[in-house]
Every structure is written in structure tokens, then in C-alpha cells.
Image: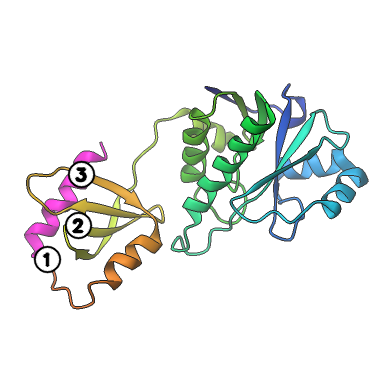
Amino acid sequence: MSYTVTENDILSIPAQAAVLALEMTGRVAMGPVGDRMARAGGEALKSALRAAKFVSVGRAAAMEGCGLPFERLILTATPRFLTGKANELMMLRLCYESVFALTEELGIESLALPFLSAMYYHFPQEEAVHIALREAEKWSGKAVFAAETPELLALSQRPYHRPRILSYIGWYRDHALFELDNGLFARVDLRPERREADMIPYFEACYRQGNNPLQTPLPAGEIARLRRLWEELAE
């Protein structure tokens, strides 16, 4: 497991394979890295993409290098950030999981890639970078990220700031639900003897809230206690 972040052009990174981010239509996703790879690949890349099978968001596929300085290209369709309530962050994590799982299957040991979705689709950049680096840590090979702007490079170098609570949603059984400022939700244990809190995707928050439509509001003091618990555990 290792990863590095560089400001160098992705085409100059010595790696067996490179990740090419696609739109849902199958075209190369916009952004400096995608633009450079599309220009370098030219008609050969366009033809290969037209012939390639459809890649859904959160999945990955491989094809030959198409004249680019890599043995293979790993294709993945990246999610758009709409409201933050459509599992966008979870889908981005699935993109990386699929990419790294496919490289393991193909025996690829080095990979050049951009920070997926970080430069387009209005994705929160800090979350996009955090997801990328967290998933790269789990991979057994060497990942080299091409930072497309100085801002992305700076984000990759500084400690991750855990998201803060925006609002209280409700409670279900032993957990309270809070909306966070990163598009996910906090699930905080209501039991005084437990000190647990974690982030969950939107669909689970809806599921839990939807299964308790007649819930009574928690007392303000209990909500404040749970907020403090989340903040302490997020330190």
C-alpha cells in the first residue's frame, strides 16, 4: 500500500495503467486530466470508447492503452453531485473500490489517476480527495494521483477535517440522525453507556426515519448531548 500526489501531467507518470473518468454517456469526463488524455488518445481512443461496453457509475472496466503511455486504461463512470442526498459520496467510493479491485484482478501494481469527480460536477473537493486517499490506502499497489490544481494538492497534504452537524433529523430505536455538511448523515447512539457515532448514506437515514413516522422529538438537552458526542468522536 502506498500513494503519492503530484502536480505532474498524468501522461508523464510512470505507471502500468491509468484511470480514465467517463461521463454516463461514455465520453471522457471534463477536466484538465481528462482533456489531456482525450487529446493524446485522439481517434484511437474515441473509437475504443465507442466500441467499449457501457460502464455504469460505481463500476470499472479495462481496455488497451490506445497509444497512451500505459499498458491499460481503467474506465470508470463518475457520479455527479446533485443535492448530496442521492448517495453521491457512496457512489464515488464504489468507483474507487471497483477500480482497485479490477487492478488487483489484472495484476496491475502501479496506477496513475486523477481525483475523480473533484474537478467537475460540483463535487465537494475535500470529500472527493479524502475518499480517494482513503481507498488508495487499502490497495496493495502504488497509486499516483495527478492533482489538477494547487488547491487539490493542498487538500491532499493537510489533515482531513471531519464534517460538522447541520441539523437534527430525528431518531429511530437507539440512534439519532443528524444531517452533516458533507452530504452524509451522522448516526449517534442514544444509549448513555455507549459512545459510538458513524457516517451513513442518505438511503439509510430515510429508511430509519421512514420506519418511525410517529416519533416524538427528543428533548433539547439530549440532542445537545448527542451533538457533543459526535464532535468528541470526530476529533
Do residues under tags 1 and 3 come within 8 Å of each other at their CB atoms? Answer: no
- The answer to whether one can see residue 9 in this image is no
Q: Earlier in the sequence, mark 2 or mark 3?
A: 2
Mark 2 residue element: strand
Residue positioned 21% across, 52% down in the render:
188
Foreground residue, 97 or 114?
97
Give the crowd class for mark 1: few <14, some 14-19, many >=20 residues within 10 Å.
Answer: few
Give the crowd class for mark 3: few <14, some 14-19, many >=20 residues within 10 Å.
Answer: some
Foreground residue, 102 or 74?
102
Residue positioned 82% across, 44% down in the render:
38
Say what amino acid the circle numbered 2 marks. His
- The answer to whether one can see residue 216 in this image is yes
Say what amino acid the circle numbered 3 marks. Glu
Q: Earlier in the sequence, mark 1 or mark 3?
A: 3
Front tag of 2 and 1:
2
Boundaries of the magenta span: 218-235
Do residues under tags 2 and 3 come within 8 Å of each other at their CB atoms? Answer: no
Residue position for label 2 = 175
Magenta-colored stretch includes residue 231: yes
Residue occupying the far bottom of the picture: 214
Residue position for label 1 = 218
Q: Earlier in the sequence, mark 2 or mark 1?
A: 2
Q: Which mark is residue 196?
A: 3
Tell whether 216 sits left or right of 108: left
Residue occupying the far front of the picture: 105
Determine which quarter of the picture holds residue 194. Answer: top left
